[in-house]
Amino acid sequence: QSALTQPASVSGSPGQSITISCTGTSSDVGGFNYVSWYQQHPGKAPKLMIYDVSDRPSGVSNRFSGSKSGNTASLTISEVQAEDEADYYCSSYRGSSTLGFGGGTKLTVL
Amino acid sequence: QVQLVQSGAEVKKPGSSVKVSCKASGGTFNSYPISWVRQAPGQGLEWMGGIIPMFHIVNYAQNFQGRVTITADESTSTAYMELSSLRSEDTAVYYCAREARIAAVGSSPLGHWGQGTLVTVSS
């Protein structure tokens, strides 16, 4: 199965908001409210930032938010900070106990 | 606090197999699915499969069917991922991750991750 589609890169200046999209199909993103977002800094394991489309684990800044419309999920980071510079991956349940990831988006803070 | 500690880096020859372990501590091991995810150098995350240890229910990604075997030993709270017929394209960091809910494999977020195990396939 193909990876979920994410832009390869996004950028923003400190204090701005950025949005990363994650496009799938009705068999994954559109069919289940089981979309998660992960942040990964170089050389580190991924960290869960958003789950079930829009829920935030405890300890994650409320500057991170998630949403979904149809087959596309989005991660928004408000008031971007230097420490947010990282790779971001979406994932979605695909039914039949399988999971898919997006190709990843590199966030550059200018 | 849940912790997942993986086995150390491996160097393997093409055609051989590798088995990576993932030992859990600080939480309930048996009920929560454990997934395996790999990341080739400079590439994205790729889900390989997962297991619910208590029931030994295993699900694999289509791309790895027939080449990967995921198992779990409840007595030691350890999950294993074995990949066979290794080729150079299998060079990657392999992660185990525990899902956050007692539910079907892949249906809940990966809340806890191991530190990763680098597997290098080279002749």
Image (cartoon, coloured by chain):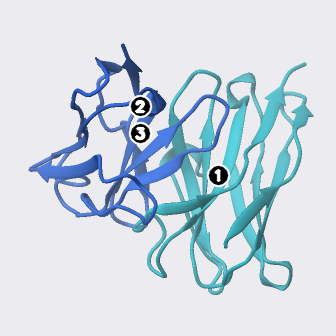
Amino acid marked by disc 2: Gly
Marks 2 and 3: same chain?
Answer: yes
> Depth check: B58 or A21 in front?
A21
Query: Which of marks 3 and 2 precedes in the sequence?
Result: 3
Instruction: Measuring from the top left, give residue A91's x and y in whole percent.
Output: 38, 49
Gap in angstroms between the C-alphas marked 2 and 3: 5 Å
Q: Secondary structure at mark 2?
A: loop
> Depth check: A20 or B42 in front?
A20
Are the residues at dot 2 and dot 1 in contact (C-beta closer than 8 Å)?
no
> Depth check: A18 or A62 in front?
A62
The shade of chain B is: cyan
Gap in angstroms between the C-alphas marked 2 and 1: 27 Å
Give the vertical position of B16 relative to B64 (above or below).
Answer: above
> Depth check: A87 or A83 in front?
A83
Tell me, for residue A89, which label it has, or none.
3
Q: Secondary structure at mark 3?
A: strand
Are the residues at dot 2 and dot 3 in contact (C-beta closer than 8 Å)?
yes
**Res B97 → quadrant:** bottom right
Instruction: Measuring from the top left, give residue A56's x and y in whole percent.
Output: 34, 61
Marks 2 and 1: same chain?
Answer: no
The shade of chain A is: blue
**Outermost residue, top direction?**
A110
The chain to which mark 3 is attached is: A
* Neighbourhood count class around disc 2 (C-alpha, 10 Å): few under 14, some 14–19, many 20 upward: many
Nearer to us of marks 1 and 3 is 3
Q: Label 1 belongs to which residue?
A: B66
Question: Measuring 84% from the left and 27% from the top, which residue is drawn there?
Answer: B14
* Neighbourhood count class around disc 1 (C-alpha, 10 Å): few under 14, some 14–19, many 20 upward: few
Instruction: Measuring from the top left, give residue A16's x and y in whole percent.
Output: 22, 27
Question: Measuring 55% from the left and 25% from the top, which residue is drawn there?
Answer: B43
Are the residues at dot 1 and dot 3 in contact (C-beta closer than 8 Å)?
no
A107 lies left or right of B58: left
